[in-house]
Image (cartoon, rainbow, N blue to C red):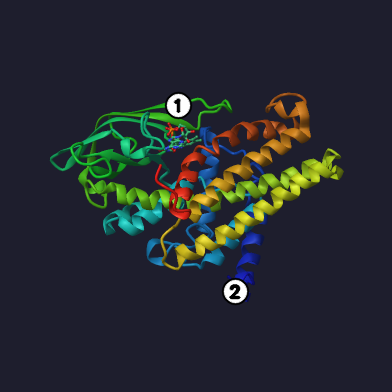
Amino acid sequence: MDFDFSEQEEALRKQVRGWLEANVPDELRGRSFTATRADREEVRRLRAWQKRMYEAGFVGLDWPPEFGGRGASVLEQIILYEEMARAESPQFVNRGALSMLGPTLMAHGAPAQQTRFLPGILTADELWCQGFSEPNAGSDLANLQTRAVLDGDHFVVNGQKVWTSMAHVADCCFALVRTNPGAPRHRGITFLLIDMTTPGITVRPLRQITGEAEFNEVFFDNVRVPVGNVVGRVDEGWGVAITTLAYERDLLTFIRHISLRSALGRLIALARRSGRASEPVVRQRIAALAIGEQCLRLNGYRSLTKILRGGAPGPEGSTAKLFWSHLDEEVAETASEILGPYSQLLEGAEWAPDEGQWAFYALLARASGIRAGTSEILRNILGERVLGLPKD
Ligand SMILES: Cc1cc2nc3c(=O)[nH]c(=O)nc-3n(C[C@H](O)[C@H](O)[C@H](O)COP(=O)(O)OP(=O)(O)OC[C@H]3O[C@@H](n4cnc5c(N)ncnc54)[C@H](O)[C@@H]3O)c2cc1C
């Protein structure tokens, strides 16, 4: 790859930088690495922020113009993410839909579905949640049991999803359901778009170690979903989901990079402020993290280049996700070591450094090695697909 930016790209960087400097709202600035989407008021603010970025032309930059994007190049998309990190802007609130469902609909959706759903993803007028995991189907996703039975021109859905981030504020859900229990596990699964206001859906919050409830249990009790909401073919949803999951590990990791850079910047500031930046051990740890962050960025360039040149996401997405979660946990741990006992003080405590952001982050980072594929599963994938080791 050529890492020099063209004049046009530098012009975009200048434009984005100027716009973000003038527009990132103070109440959202710098909260990217600890921002969650548990609180409804925070979600409302994040929604408004995505819409403002959309109106300025910065959401879906890399989506083709026929789908509402600007058809920008990989480098231009990277410039946007870099500048969002620099400006300490929050990530997009609808990032799951932007990075997973959008590309999935472009690849597998019917034209009517693309027209109906893609605009709301860009503007955040429709927030999406991902209904994949179930109590007995996490890493082993193909074990999912939520049933959908055809009844006239609707599917009737019954079952339970779990760990569904943002279900309590989402308008819609992209879900996997079993339509043919007699078929082999990976067949007989269908990819369904579900309106969260449909009667029969119950959302129950699950409180996390951070004290917040960003994810939920979702129960489906005779929920009627139009047949027109099937993405791809009935019983062939596994192939559709593979596209979604590959984008989840690949593009989403790149988007999460925004929060990692922001956290690293704050860590360096913290080390300086606390007088620990001159200690050799602290310096070495921070240097190692900064080098890791650069490696993650370069690996991200590589896989994004491949995808946007028409290639499919490959195992480098698994490397990126694995490495990102490791760095995320390391940044949180290093901050805790610098702060000592103060690292445990949460927001509201009198002596909490940086308003308790570090204590919150240390707890939140525990989830990094679980969501979007656990570290063990990613190592299995790399062992099998990259190193050619025997199957798990
Ligand atoms: C913060 C957060 C947000 C999430 N948001 C969503 C969401 O919005 N939508 C959604 O659908 N899901 C979501 N999830 C769920 C997530 O995808 C699952 O937690 C994940 O896939 C792991 O599944 P599980 O929790 O059932 O654990 P399990 O699959 O039961 O795994 C338990 C442990 O066993 C290990 N293990 C399992 N199988 C193997 C194996 N073959 N080899 C070696 N080790 C193995 C795992 O690595 C793990 O350590 C979220 C999770 C988190 C933490």
Depth check, front residue: 150 or 338? 338
Tell me the residue at 60%/72% (across/down): 2
Residue 1 percent location from the top left of the image: 58, 70
Residue matched to label 1? 205
Q: Earlier in the sequence, mark 1 or mark 2?
A: 2
Q: Does dot 1 land on a helix, a strand or a loop?
A: strand
The answer for how far apart the CA atoms under marks 1 and 2 are is 46 Å
Looking at the image, residue 50 lies above or below residue 221: below
Residue type at numbered disc 1: Pro
**Residue 42 visible here:** yes
**Residue that lies at the very extreme toward the left in this rendered image:** 152
**Residue 124 visible here:** no
Tell me the residue at 24%/45% (across/down): 187
Residue 255 percent location from the top left of the image: 55, 51
Q: Does dot 2 land on a helix, a strand or a loop?
A: helix
Q: How crowded is the residue under tag 1: few (<14 C-alpha within 10 Å), some, or many (20+)?
A: many
Residue 114 lies in what quarter of the image? Answer: bottom left
Residue 213 percent location from the top left of the image: 51, 28
Residue matched to label 2? 8
Which of the four quarters of the rendered structure image does ligand 1 lie in?
top left
Tell me the residue at 56%/26% (across/down): 209
Residue 118 lies in what quarter of the image? Answer: bottom left
Residue 285 percent location from the top left of the image: 75, 44
**Residue that lies at the very extreme toward the bottom in this rendered image:** 7
Question: Left of 68 or right of it: where is 179?
Answer: left
Residue type at numbered disc 2: Gln
Q: How crowded is the residue under tag 2: few (<14 C-alpha within 10 Å), some, or many (20+)?
A: few
